[in-house]
Amino acid sequence: MKEQTKKALRCEIGFTLLALGVLVAVILNIWVGSANISVADVFKILFTDAFEGDAVNTIVWDLRLPRLCAAALLGGALGVSGYLIQTYFRNPICSPFELGISSGAKMVLAFCTVVVTNFLGGMSGVSMVLASFVGSLISMGFVLLCAGKTKNMAILLIIGIMIGYICSAVTDLIITFAKQEEIVNLTFWSMGSFSGTDWKDVAVIAGFVLTAFAGTLLLIKPIGAFQLGEGYAQSMGMNVRLFRVLVILLSSLLSACVVAFAGPVSFVGIAVPHLTKLIFNTSKPSVILPGSFLLGALFCLICDLIARTIFAPTELAIGTVTAIFGAPVVIAMLLNSRRKSA
């Protein structure tokens, strides 16, 4: 009983700290930037009409707030998507980026952007997500096909990385034949960034991400059963094949949303689920899923703040910052797993 009480207390403390961390990160993202706005002015802009029509009001409401909302939602999507992929393949170093799924989404979206822009004049936010979703499913299909040929996860990861390289090469080829203005936009987008997001984009992101996250929460019990083995899951009456399909669709949709609006963002999908398990000291899906969403949001909010302020007015690609913080976590995971197996 005492052990259960300790675990419950740890979960409460963990979620409280994550929620406070997200709140602090949101405040910092509104306050800190190349334009100097005091904390008092920020609160006046948010809760009064004192600066209505001024440039600082536009900066806060039209630039910083939509951007931080996108960073939080897409960061949460990356954390949950990484956890679903790791559950599916039973491997803690799998994620949409490392398996080439994000690269497939990037390839198809780049192709559609160039073709549709030339003939129809542009793509809506929903069509961008759908194009990325198709690309995610194509790459995932190749990964699953290879997974049926080999049970060695190291080989499967290498194959995923190679698929990612192929998709990136095709994307670069598409960009080469794009128009001059398209090349600039596609190149900047392919490096990863939350900039340029408006409230219409946030509405589309929230619609897809929160719907997919809600669908994932409905799979909490099946995920827990699947983690105990396919035989156990089937003995509990679970349709394992349907479960696998749902996991693929949900993880692909979440990663597609990220690629559509922020470009490929590396290492978050691997690092966040692992760090969440360390924080809560459990692998229960009922804890790890919401924990991964919150930590993913916090991780990307902090990384985006660093990306746009550390060398301001020059902005770093978000993938650069997430790699700096995420790669050491992955290295530590690999060394730890090697030490355990020794």
Image: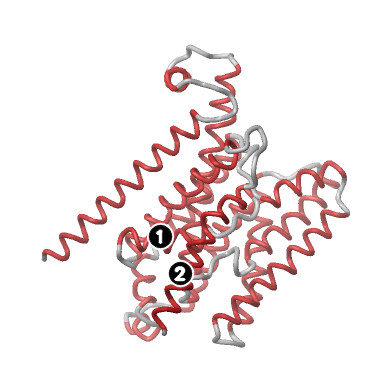
Q: For the N terminus, which image quadrant?
A: bottom left
Q: Which mark is residue 129?
A: none
Q: Is 130 located above or below residue 314 in the figure? A: below
Residue sitting at the far top: 50
The amino acid type of the residue labelled 2 equals Met
Where's residue 168, x and y in %? Answer: 74, 63
In the picture of the structure, the residue carrying the numbered disc 2 is: 333
Q: Image point 54% across, 26% down: which residue? A: 60
In the picture of the structure, the residue carrying the numbered disc 1 is: 275
The amino acid type of the residue labelled 1 equals Leu
Q: Is 3 located above or below residue 78 in the figure? A: below
| Mark 1 secondary-structure assignment | helix
Q: Earlier in the sequence, mark 1 or mark 2?
A: 1
Q: Is residue 271 left or right of residue 265?
A: left
Where's residue 142, x and y in %? Answer: 66, 75
Q: Is residue 257 left or right of residue 294?
A: right
Q: Image point 59% across, 22% down: which residue? A: 58
> What is the CA distance from the residue labelled 1 to the residue labelled 2?
10 Å
Residue 226 appears in the picture as rendered:
yes
The image quarter containing residue 159 is: bottom right
